[in-house]
Amino acid sequence: MIEVLLLAIALSMDAFAVSIGLGSKQKSNPTSLALISGVYFGLFQGLMPTNSH
């Protein structure tokens, strides 16, 4: 169980760092960037643990 918790923390820190980079680069329409990046992060990070077996 601790491994799952550590994996979740590591993935959230990674997504946070990439989001900061995307946000600092983006000049216009931050709402669409937030929605698109949220969908991509959610999709790929949701699929990542299922493929690790």
Image (spheres, grey):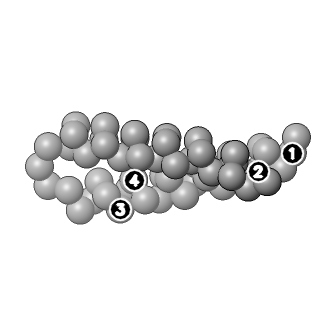
Above or below 26: residue 34: above
Residue type marked 1: Ile
Towards the viewer: 52 or 1? 52
Asked if marks 3 and 4 touch (Cβ < 8 Å), the reply is yes
Q: Earlier in the sequence, mark 4 or mark 2?
A: 2
Q: Secondary structure at mark 1?
A: helix
Q: CA distance from mark 3 to mark 2?
A: 23 Å
User: Which percent across, then down, holds residue 39?
Assistant: 40, 39
Q: How far apart are the alpha carbons under marks 4 and 1?
A: 26 Å
Measure how far apart labels 3 and 1 are at the Cα level. 29 Å
User: Which residue is disc 2 drawn over?
Assistant: 6
Amino acid at the residue labelled 3: Gly
Q: What type is the residue that disc 4 sits on? A: Ser
Q: Residue at x 46, y 47 (%)?
A: 41
Nearer the observer, 47 or 29: 47
Mark 1 or mark 4, which is nearer the start of the sequence?
A: 1
Q: Which residue is mark 3?
A: 21
| Quadrant that contains the C terminus | bottom right
Mark sitting on residue 20: none
Which residue is rendered at x = 31% and y = 58% of the image? 22
Instruction: State the residue position of label 4.
Output: 19
Residue drawn at point x = 59 percent, y = 45 percent: 47
